[in-house]
Every structure is written in C-alpha cells, then in structure tokens.
Amino acid sequence: MPDNAQQFASDNYSGICPEAWAAMAEANLGHQRAYGDDEWTARAADHFRRLFETDCEVFFAFNGTAANSLALASLCQSYHSVICSETAHVETDECGAPEFFSNGSKLLPARTDNGKLTPQAIRDVALKRQDIHYPKPRVVTLTQATEVGTVYRPEEVRAISQTCEELGLHLHMDGARFSNACAFLGCSPAELTWKAGVDVLCFGGTKNGMAVGEAIIFFDKGLAEDFDYRCKQAGQLASKMRYLSAPWVGILQDDAWLKYANHANHCAQLLATLVSDVPGVSLMFPVEANGVFLQLSEPAIAALTARGWRFYTFIGAGGARFMCSWDTDEARVRQLAADIREVMGA
Ligand SMILES: *Cc1c(COP(=O)(O)O)cnc(C)c1O
C-alpha cells in the first residue's frame, strides 16, 4: 500500500477539497486588510448568516480544541461547570484545554445512550449537588454528530434545550461533524441549532474538506461580547485571516459542504452494508454519520494493520473505528470490506 493511500483512521487524514482550494487561491491574489478586516472574512460570515437564516455572530479559529474551549469559556465563570458526555471530545481529547481557557471550569461527564446525552442524564448531573462546595453547572455541551457516529434529532436537541432552560444552563454544540449530521437528517442547519435552542455552535471545516479552520457561531449575540479579545489572547486571531475564512466561502457558496458530507456518510453506509454479513463482525453503534464502529476479533485487527490499514481502536477491546471522508473512494471502501471479510476468516 503506498504511503499516501486513502485510510479510514480519521476524516482529517484527507486533503483539501477543490472548492476550498480554489477560494484560497483566489484570496491569494493581491493584498487584503489583516486580522479579519478583509473582504473574504466578511463574505464568509455573511454566508453563515444566510445558511443559518439568522443574524448570528461569527468567529474563526484554527482548530476544534480552541473553538470549543473558547466558546465554553465564554459561557461560564471559573467556578462554573460544563456537563458533557463521558465520550465527549472536550473531555477525552482536548488535553484539559476547556478547563485551561475557562480558568478552571470543571467538566462533568454524564452517561450517554449511543453517545448521546439525554435530558435525564443532564438532570441527574445538574441536580446531584446544589451546595456551595460543588462547581455550579452552567453549560451543557453536545457533540453533533457524536464521537460514536450517531446523530441527535432536532427533537432530541429541543428536549435538551428545554431541560437547559429549566435548569438555567447554556447550550453549546461541538459540531466538528455538524455537516455530516445535517446531511444525515436532511434538515436545515437552523432547525438543528438555534431553532432547537442551541446558543453557540462550533462548526467544523477541517474534517469536511478544509485545510484548517472551525467557525464559532453565536446565535445568542449577547454571549459573543468580547469574544474577539478571547480569541486574540488565546493565539487564535489569524493575522492573514483571509486564509481561514476564504475556504468557508468556497465550501458554503455552492453547498459543497453538504455534498461532501453526504458522500462521506454514503461511504460509511456502504462499508457497514458490505461487512454486515461477515461472521463475527458486529456494529457497535448505528451508522448515521461518516463513522463505522465495528467489533472485530483481536487477530483480525492485527491482520488488518499488517495489511497496511490504519484505523483507531481506542474504543475498547476489539472495537475498531473507520471514518470516511469527503474524498473517500468507493473502490477503497470495497477493498477494506473485502480485507475485513478475509481476516475474519469468512
Ligand atoms: C476532530 C474533533 C474536534 C476538533 O479537534 P482538533 O484536533 O482540535 O481540531 C472537536 N470535536 C470533535 C468531536 C472532533 O472529532
């Protein structure tokens, strides 16, 4: 297998999509004002306002860790806490950045069903303690699509936001794979966010065809006060901002974001279908977005690795994660499925 063969370890193994690339090339012509005062940044923000059908505040950061951490920090004080799922990226994969950037706001993991928080799980954590010795719950963060490839339905988000309202909590959404969730549900970005009660969304670009970049979108504009200073202090204010914002114009203007998310989701469905009848292989979670989580035998995992396949196995014994990307080649999916069948001895 060549070194740059398509892999399924993560959707960020992929490169840059043509639309993002072309917009960057166009943005590269001539000079533009720096620090986000340029034409491309204004255009990208307008595209988001059109896409979400509302007058939201839009910011750009280099990656998801920064976007999530700074968004959460803007929603709480250091003595507050943030309720998240036990599998949340903010809890397991951000090296304490949410706590660091919020000066100590504690993350409180809650149990999940197929990677999703429920109103009851949130209530249990939020109401467990109400005394002065416990960090006061102030925010709930959801991951859409979740870390295990499932997707919250609009009514599930609404039920959670109602719980948040009752308990006095803000609602944040980690949308590193928001595009894949929209593609799966076929509903509008507005329905899945502010119309369902989400206050702030971190919209991922990196895993859906961009080189770098996440957008932080405040639907409750009051919460965005001084957010630009927070970004600057955290080293997230790009001096040549147009290279962060132009690719968004590229993927938003003709709906490439949705086309690619649909493609990645379709490839995940294909992989799941192709291995569904292999003896000993089982799906660990419903395939809804662009990830397939399979229970395989340990020898099969070793054999796949020996054949050159790269994938993550952080989800426990025999669990393997396969992520599809905006550019995943169906032939490559078929090759992987055939190899899974072989190493499982089918
Ligand atoms: C990839 C990812 C992020 C962003 O990670 P960075 O490496 O910081 O860009 C955030 N949340 C989830 C669920 C992710 O999968």
Image (tube, grey):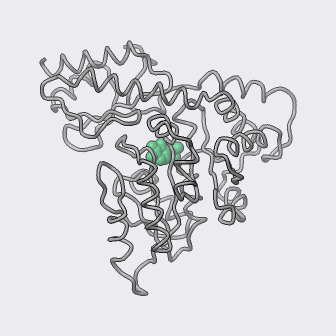
Quarter of the rendering occupied by the N terminus: top left
Taking the image as shown, residue 322 lies to the left or right of residue 22, namely left
Q: Position of residue 313 (x, y in %)?
A: 28, 38
Residue drawn at (21%, 23%) of the image: 303
Position above or below: 217 against 209:
below
Q: Horizontal and vertical percent for residue 140?
A: 46, 63
x and y percentages locating residue 105 in the rendered image:
49, 70
Q: Residue at x 61, y 65 (%)?
A: 74
Q: Position of residue 69 (x, y in %)?
A: 54, 58
Taking the image as shown, residue 273 lies to the left or right of residue 14, namely left
Q: Quadrant of the C terminus?
A: top left
**In the depicted view, which residue is nearer to us: 71 or 6?**
71
The mark total stands at 0
Q: Which sits in the foreground, 28 or 216?
A: 216
- Position of 203 with respect to 228 (left or right) is left
Between 268 and 254, which is closer to the camera in this rendering?
254
Name the quadrant containing residue 18.
top right
Q: Residue at image x 83%, y 46%? A: 37
